[in-house]
Amino acid sequence: MNAAETRLFLAALRAALSRGQGAAIATVVGVRGSAYRREGTRMLVLDDASQVCMLSGGCLEAEVVEVALEVIRTGTPALTHYDLSEDATWGLGIGCGGSVDVRVERVDMNDPVMGAWLDVLGGGEAAVLAVPLQGAGKILVRSDGAVLGQLGPGLHDFAVTAALERLGLREPRAVTLHAPDGQAVFLDVNTPSPPLVIYGAGHDAMPLSAQAHALGYDVHVIDPREAYLTSARFPGAVLHPLAPEELTEFSMPARAQVIVMNHHLDRDRLCLHHALKSGAEYVGVLGPRSRAQDLLDALRAEGVTFTEVEMSRLRSPIGLRIGAEAPEEVALSVLAELMAWRRGYDGGFLNGHAGRIHDALTHVNET
């Protein structure tokens, strides 16, 4: 789940608890073959059978709601296997050809681990919830190694080590692993929203910021023109009214992805200098390659040099080749590239790919 889905999920849960409603969390913990969503996808089910978020394209939800209502009533977690190819049994004509395992647990705010996990989700903290798929208990593992809760012998140390290793990946995802003794443990991973820093508050930055926020990015917009830099133009973004010579006042977020799009050569030159020296992982310059080259040439003429590592972060032109023209289309193109870059895909067509769609990985981007 991305941060936008998580915000919706948590808001609905808080509202339900404030009304005194019972609730359960259904989580995809295993996927084999083709499925609509991947491990770690969550759905909230309330005691009136209403639901928030989805585990699939609509083929699982009704069945999961029935299971969740029983879990809310009894308090006993349930692990259910759904074979999406069993059309004769379900009579739904889905034909996805895969199967998923869904774990459902009642929300118990007296459980300190569950309470801490919900706080982690709300705060965007890097942490892992480790839950045995057979047996009781759960632990919360934070990125600093702090552990809340206890698992049984043979599983606790394995789960802690696996969780910390998972958090060290660039784009850690939820996964079910097996300890040496065969016990299965699900690692539900939460990481901070990916930061997107946009230099420039022009008209075309608005759809980029809005679409990025909808996808769960932590968006920052930098521009010295306060008339352009308003919450009405950039809802959900953090605004920084800084001139290029004031950029040292801005603390670049860890693992930031940066887009330079001031449409002003002097500002773009200084912003590119700041971005490449900041340690940002991705530095994209909007426009043709020649424009980025002109900016680099001007910086070099001023005596500014960049290391090979710094230059390796530069991307120009940016965006996928989809024929984008309008600002909204350009934003879509750019964000599609960012997603592919983060997750290790080349952004090409899926047409003709015979395996699992999510197995169309083209490069590893996990360090």
Image (tube, helix red, strand yellow):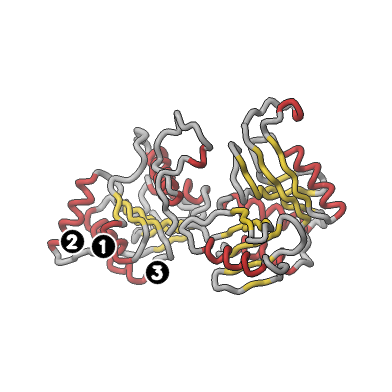
User: Sequence-wise, which precedes: disc 2 or disc 1?
Assistant: 1
The kind of secondary structure element at disc 3 is loop
Mark identifier at residue 273? 1
- Residue 51: image quadrant is top right
- Residue, far right: 74
Circles 2 and 3: CB distance less than 8 Å?
no
- Residue, far front: 181
Q: Quadrant of the C terminus?
A: bottom left
Question: As rendered, which of 219 and 33 lies closer to the eye?
Answer: 33
Placement of 215 over or under 115, stated as above or below: above
Task: Give the Cα separation between the discs numbered 2 and 3.
Answer: 22 Å
Task: Give the Cα separation between the discs numbered 2 and 1.
Answer: 8 Å
Measuring from the top left, give residue 205's x and y in whole percent: 39, 48
Circles 2 and 1: CB distance less than 8 Å?
yes
Task: Give the Cα separation between the discs numbered 3 and 1.
Answer: 15 Å
Measuring from the top left, give residue 216's x and y in whole percent: 52, 52
- Residue 245: image quadrant is bottom left
Residue on which the image places disc 2: 299
User: Looking at the image, which residue is at 71% across and 55% down?
Assistant: 133
Query: Please, what is the three-letter code of the amino acid marked with disc 2?
Result: Leu
Question: As rendered, which of 337 and 248 lies closer to the eye?
Answer: 337
Measuring from the top left, give residue 201's x and y in whole percent: 37, 53
Circles 3 and 1: CB distance less than 8 Å?
no
Residue on which the image places disc 3: 251
The kind of secondary structure element at disc 1 is helix
Measuring from the top left, give residue 4's x and y in whole percent: 57, 51
The kind of secondary structure element at disc 2 is helix
- Residue, far left: 301
